[in-house]
Amino acid sequence: MIIFNRIKTNLSLIFSKDLCKELPTIAKNIKKYREKLDISQDKLSKLADIAYNVIIKIESGATLNPTIETMAKIAKGLGVSIDDLMKYIMESEKNLVVKNTQNGKGVFAIKKFGKGEIIFEFHGKFFTYKELPTPYNGVEDHYVQLGENLYMGPSGGIDDYFNHSCSPNTGLKINSKKVFLIAVEKINEGDEITWDYSTTMDENDWEMDCECRSKNCRHRIRDFKYLPRDIQQRYLSLGIVPKYISRNF
Ligand SMILES: [Zn+2]
């Protein structure tokens, strides 16, 4: 089995080399830590309790979207924190820029991202429903619902400028209190980074007009439960609907 995997690795390495594909930073980070600790991929798979070919796929760039759970296991196997392993995300603002748009400010990519790549980690403070300011004005005041009774407030940083789109190119993935923006399609340099606010909304008492101008614009940003069925299904299959909502669908 191991021999088979090694052949596969070599093939995938040749494959990526042929395409001149740059390895994702997460792959480079794992390799960097492995080399520093002098741990083979085989040993890491045992330490992290992850299948050998999963490690191979991530390190070779064949898997661009490892789950947060997998990343946590790899971090544990390497004896580093998930934050250290994913440090590049904290530095990811280098890959993004805030610019003025027709509807105020927005965040734009200054490099390409592949589907499934982590684009950003949010850093705002958490609030319960009771702790929210009144009158509560939802995402217009940069508050995002992230749990049944959990909201993230503005960070004062780039976090506050990701706009909504009814045809988004990213989605939110939440793992306990870590919140990431993940590309749901290929993103080119210069593209605005957007996500569909409805994917995390189960607010019942708050909604807003939409001026995203996408051809699929729904004109009103409302709770996930009010989205058309096909859009709900698409977001659920992309894994960008948090559990407090997806468990009801
Ligand atoms: Zn819209």
Image: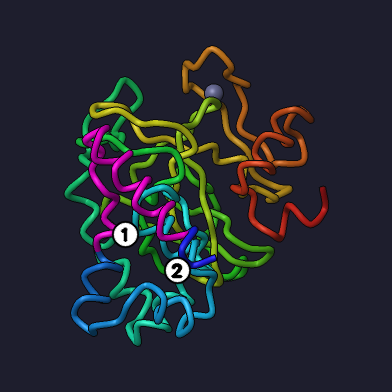
Q: Does the magenta stretch include residue 19?
A: yes
The residue at the point 26 percent across, 55 percent down is 25
Image quadrant for the N terminus? bottom right
Q: Quadrant of ligand 1?
A: top right
Task: Residue 7: give x, y in percent of width and height.
Answer: 41, 54
Mark 2 residue element? helix
**Residue 26 marker:** 1
**Residue 71 marker:** 2
Task: Residue 138: give x, y in percent of width and height.
Answer: 53, 48
Of all residues, the one furthest to the top in this rendering is 215
* Mark 2 or mark 1: whose residue is earlier in sequence: 1
Task: Residue 48: give x, y in percent of width and height.
Answer: 47, 80
Left-right relation of 133 to 234: left
- Number of numbered tags placed on the structure image: 2
The residue at the point 73 percent across, 32 percent down is 227
Mark 1 residue element? helix
Give the residues drawn in magenta, as a range.
5-28
Task: Residue 131: give x, y in percent of width and height.
Answer: 55, 70
Say whether marks 2 and 1 touch (CB < 8 Å): yes
